[in-house]
Amino acid sequence: MEQPTAARGSIILLAVLAITSALGYGLNIVLAWLLPADDYGTYGIAIAILGILSIFITYGFPWTVVKFLAEYGDKGTSYPIFKSALLGNFLIALVISALFYLVYSFFLFSTNIPDAVIFIIMAIILVFSLRAIYLRTLHGRMRFQEFGTVSIIEAVLRVAVGLGLVLLGYNVAGALAGQLLAGLVAPIIAAYLLRDFKFWLGKGWANIKVFTFAWRMFLGMLGITMLNQVDILGVRFFSQGTVTAQLVGYYQAVRILAFIPLYLAGGFMGGVFPFISRYAEEGSRNYFLLTLRYIVLIAIPFFAILVAIPGSFIELVFPPAYVAGADAIRILAVGGVLVAIIYVLVQVLQALGHPGLPAKVLMIAALLQIGLLAVLVPNFGLVGAAAATSIACLFGAIWLTVKIAVLYQLKPQLGQIVKLLLTLAITGLSLFLIPHSGRILTVLDVVLVSMIYLFLLVVLRLLRVSDIDILRSALPQNSLILAPVRVLKKLIVRLGGS
C-alpha cells in the first residue's frame, strides 16, 4: 500500500476541495438565480448562522481527533479519544441547538426567517456533530482518498437534493434540507469505511489533556469562523434600515468570491496538519514555509482580479444586480487573503501543540471586528462591513506572524517580498488594461493574465524546480497528467530557474 505523504495528502484534499467547492459555489450561484434576492439574503444569513454554530462541533473535538490520531497512529490510546470525542461532540450539539432555539425564540431573531429554516439548522447541527468525528477520524488516520470520497458524495447529494427541493418550491428550507440529508449519509459511509477501527474495544475515556486541547482549539477556530461569517450578520443587524434584504444577498455574493483563498488554505492544511502533528520536532518548519508560500502565490491572482475588475468578475458568475457589491469586494479581498494566512498560522500552532495563543488572538480580533461593524455598517453599509473584517484580519495576521517568526526564528525576506509585490502590480495592471466588458472578454482577460502571472513566477524565480518535483511526486503517475508538469519544469530550467 502506498504510504501517505504531506504533498500527496494536500493534492488529494485540494482536488476534493476543487470538486466540492465547485459544487458548493455552483449551488450558491444557481440559488442566486432561482431565489428572489431577499430569499437569497435569508439563505446567506442562515448559512452564516450555521457556520458559526457549526464551529462548536466542527473544530474542537474533530480536529483534536485528527491531531492525536495522527500523533499516536493506530495505538490503543486512539480508541478512548474517539469515543470521548464522539460523545462529547454530540452533547455539545444538543446544548448548542437548544440554546440557539431559546435565543431565536426570545431574544435576537424577531425576523422573517421561517420556523422551518430554524428547525432545519438545529437538525443539521446534531447530524454534523457525528459526521465531523467520523470524517476527521479518516483524516487523522491519513486515509485521504476515503475522506475525499465521502466528502464528494456528500457534496453531490447536497446539491442534487437542495436544488431539487428549491425547484419544487421549498426555497430556503429546501436548500438547507439538502445539507441535512447529505450530512446524514456521510457518517454512515464513513462508519462503514472505519469498520476496522474497533473503538469499542478501547477501555476508559480520554484524559483531561484531550478535553483542554479541544477547548482551546475550538476557540481558535471559532475566531477564524467569526472573521469570515460575522460580517454578513453585521450587515443585517447593524444596518438600522439603511441596508435592505436585497443588499444582504449582494454581500453574500461578495463573501463567496472574496474568501476563495481561505478555502484553498483549508485544502492545503488538511494534508499538512497531520504531518506537522506527527513530526512536530523535525521538519515542521519546512512544511509551514512551503504551505505559506503556496497559499500566497495562489492568493495573488484572486486578489488582483477582485481589486482590478471586481464588477466584471461578479457579473461573470452572478446576476448583473449583484455588481452593487463591487466596491465592497475590493476591500474584502484584503481580508480574504489575510484570513487564509491566519488559517495557516493557526493550524501550524495548533499542530505544534500551542492552541492557546491563536485562541486568544482571534477572540480579540473577533471582538474588534464586531465593534468595527457596529460603527462602520450604519455609516458605510457593505463597504463598512468589508472594512471592519479586513482591519480585524490584519490585526490577527500581524500578531500571529510575529509569534511564528519567533518560534521558527524567521527573518524577513525582502527580496521575495519585492518580487511578490511586483508580480501583484503587473498582474493587476494587466487585468485592468485588457478589455473585460462582457462575460466572454472577462474570461479571456482572466485566462490571458493567468498565463502572464505564471510567466512572471518563472522569470522571477518564485516558482522553482523543487516545487514542480513536489507536485510531480504527489500526482498520479500517469503520462497524460504528468505531461504539462514536465513541460513546466523544462521551461523553468530553460529560463535559468533552480
Image (tube, rainbow, N blue to C red):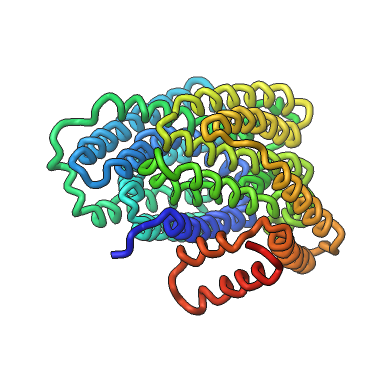
Pinpoint residue 435: horizontal percent, then vertical percent: 85, 64
Kindly tell me whether residue 149 is visible in this rendering. yes
Tell me the quadrant of the picture where the C terminus can be found.
bottom right
Q: Could you tell me which residue is drawn at 51 percent across and 35 percent down?
A: 346
Q: Could you tell me which residue is drawn at 70 percent across and 54 percent down?
A: 301
Kindly tell me whether residue 322 is visible in this rendering. no
250 displayed left or right of 159 = right
Which quarter of the picture shows residue 374? top right
349 displayed left or right of 411 = left
Which quarter of the picture shows residue 120? top left
Q: Could you tell me which residue is drawn at 69 percent across and 55 percent down?
A: 318
Pinpoint residue 189: horizontal percent, then vertical percent: 29, 56
Which quarter of the picture shows residue 337? top right
Pinpoint residue 333: horizontal percent, then vertical percent: 70, 43
| 233 lies above or below 182 | above
- 238 or 299, which is in the foreground? 299
- 359 or 367, which is in the foreground? 359
Q: Tell which residue pokes out farthest to the bottom in this image.
A: 479
- 25 or 265, which is in the foreground? 265
Tell me the quadrant of the picture where the N terminus can be found.
bottom left
| 343 lies above or below 3 | above
Q: Could you tell me which residue is drawn at 81 percent across and 55 percent down?
A: 426
- 440 or 78, which is in the foreground? 78
Question: Tag count in the figure?
Answer: 0
Pinpoint residue 474: horizontal percent, then vertical percent: 46, 63
